[in-house]
Image (cartoon, rainbow, N blue to C red):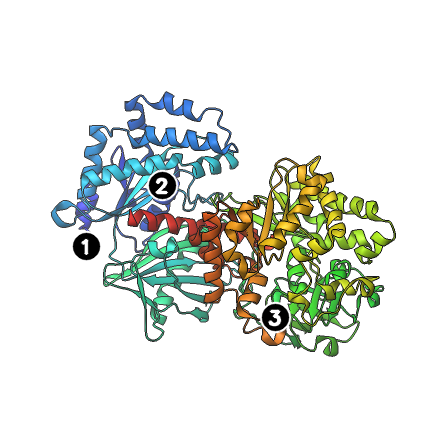
Amino acid sequence: MSTLSRPAAEARAVAPGKFTRRFDQLDRGALAIAGGKGSNLAELTRAGFPVPPGFVVLVSAYEAALAASEMGPRLSAALEDLNVDDTDALQAAAKTAKEIVSKLEIPEEIAREITSAYQRLGGKDGEPLVAARSSATAEDAPSASFAGMFESFLQVRGVESLLGRIRDCWASSYSPRVLFYRAKQSMPTEMPVAVVVQQMIESERSGIIFTANPATHDTSSIVIEATWGLGEAIVQGQVTPDRYVLDKKTLGVREMKIAATRPVGDETARQRMAGPERVLSDTDLTTLAELAIRAESHFGAPQDLEFAIDSTGTYLTQTRPITTLSGVTDRPQTDVDGGRSGVAHPAAAQILVRGMGASPGTATGLVRVLTDVASGKEMKQGEVLVAHMTSPDWVPLMRRAVAIVTDAGGMTSHAAIVSRELGVPCVVGTRDATRVLRPSLRVTVDGSAGTITEAGSAAREPSPHPAKAEARPAAGRVVTATRLYVNLADPSQAESVAAQDVDGVGLLRAEFMLLEALDGAHPKQLLAEGKRDEIVRKLTEPLARIAAAFHPRPVIYRAMDFRSNEFRVLRGGETHEPVEANPMIGYRGCYRYVEEPELFGVELAALQEVRKRHDNVHLMIPFVRTEWELRRCLEVVNRSPLGESRGLQRWVMAEVPSVIWRMKDYAALGITAVSIGSNDLTQLVLGVDRDNERLASLYDERDAAVLAAIREIVVRAHEAGMTVSICGQAPSVHPEYADFLVQQGIDSISVVPDAIERTRVNIARAEQRVLLERRRLA
């Protein structure tokens, strides 16, 4: 075990160096010379927080080493006029810059000072075990975190090893992600970096503390995640930690989720215990919470802290502002996955109905109970739509609603999916909302907690469409190798969503635009009336609006996937649709296009019209069961004018499990990409009707069998030379799904608009964990 203290007289005897400073010789005002991490640790040390001893290799050391090498002009030339949006140019410039910096010779004067500071930390034979962490001058600042972008190195021992890691930290200042981030933050391309050298804690337990909930922006909570062993495992996402949510005022535990894993020997593998075993005791939680509250008070802003616990005590190893908070609230919120986290309704608010929270947010309005679309003519903007279940022809009504409540359905029912994409709070599976909720009753719908309560007449009216509000300015763009797409349905959202940090549209649903174009009629009915050109024109306009908003980013248009029961409710539907016992696995998707090429041709014509001006729109074919069926469908595409459109990408949805065994066949037909539809894939792997609320407990996209199917799809698609995405609801409602998908090597993930920001962060953390693991195995 390392000794963490030195005699005070010895510490005072050492004067500040030219190139190095101990933590207690700096403070938070030293950002320009010690970087964000160094100045924050220094401030914690001077304020009396328990911080392992260490020192900072100042920015001046880097500047002096660069000047002595006379490589400064070459470095500047490599970065001059760099267009970070040009991926090839960015990679090339970063590679050149990193090579220059990583080969810098550290002048003897600097090396001697670093050696002296290092040896004063103690340790066996004057070679203590330390961590070397990059500390950029804009890192861990209130406006930009650079979280996870710079290099850190643990278990460093010996002078030569430390000097090498310091060079590596300097070089990490020129990685592609850092250069991109700087450019988008309007920061200088060249920015010096300091290095924190800190004595390692032989951690028995460690983790992170947030003094506000970063997922819900709840400032009344403290969130602590903890694991056994070194803290890097949790920071980089290597392990599933315990999670504790505490009340900031009482320090009482609101929520506790136990991971119950321990390290096995010196290996990184984890062994599940026979029973739950908490990483942190109640005493530990109180100690950590008190330290966190003190830190928040001292810095004057919510903090993201790292801690380590060994046999000698509890230590803080890092702190930084939480840069993702905006629109903060001081009341408890519900987790993204719909789990309860202590939401307390006012005593006067009676819970009338409970169901499954399907789309987050709260809204208040008058109840409008509808039995069918025709009865919705009198529905007004801002009312709460209450129905047994919705289908595609309900979309115009859903757009008027401030919130949506249904008797039936689960997390992937039509009402749930559409509500999330419209940004409207939604509760599904209530069983009896249409009976209990009286017309014109004023209620508040909590789409996170899954409750509908009676609202007083003075209740505050929230925005009916929070997703359509102006996008909040991001504190800093998180750059990921895995592309992040968005699921889109409503053309009116195109511009606001395109302004967010997304790489394109991974799923553009045809159904909603078609409903507008069809004006409540069955498409075959309009074709019979000679209105084909009118349908094409009405479909082209909204599609072109979306394509223009996202250009040149890709927009993947999924052809209409109405089921027969949904088509039958349209005008003329009874004439043109069969009656099926189970339409969910009936006449839909690819097979329908083969059987009704004229109807499919309407969509192909609209796509071709749009691609004349916006070549970023591509075609995705859903619900593909067999190779011969897909081949005939593609023949329809190729015979149409769209088939001659250069650069058109042909995608298929990976929903039917047969896709696993037909990947090479599909690739041979010219398919270049697959997108996993986790909703239908889960349904078909588990044999669960996803619209049946009675089976909701069986429907789980996280089931081992579903995950195994996804893993096989990714592997086999890559073997066949195809890219892989996912556009089902799983990544939007289960944040941990991103970690699994990144581990499998998926190329892109598509989520609903409300999940963009948190998913990008989840992807970045998962990618860091994968890189760390690869580095460990190398």
Between circles 2 and 1, the one closer to the viewer is 2
Q: Position of residue 316 (x, y in %)?
A: 33, 55
Residue kind at label 2, given as amino acid type: Ser
In front: 462, or 79? 79
Q: How crowded is mark 2: few (under 14 residues within 10 Å), some or many (20 or more)?
A: many
* Distance between mark 1 and mark 3 Cα atoms: 60 Å
Is the residue under label 3 in contact with that under label 2 (CB below 8 Å)? no
Tell me the residue at 19%/55% (across/down).
2
The kind of secondary structure element at disc 1 is loop
Of labels 1 and 3, earlier in sequence is: 1
Above or below for 254 versus 613: below
* Distance between mark 2 and mark 1 Cα atoms: 24 Å
In front: 710, or 626? 626
Query: Which dot marks residue 257?
Result: none
Residue kind at label 1, given as amino acid type: Thr
Residue 341 visible in the snapshot: yes
Residue under pointer 3 = 689
Q: Position of residue 101 (x, y in %)?
A: 32, 30
Residue 334 visible in the snapshot: no
Q: How crowded is mark 1: few (under 14 residues within 10 Å), some or many (20 or more)?
A: some
Q: Identify the residue at the far right of this view.
A: 529
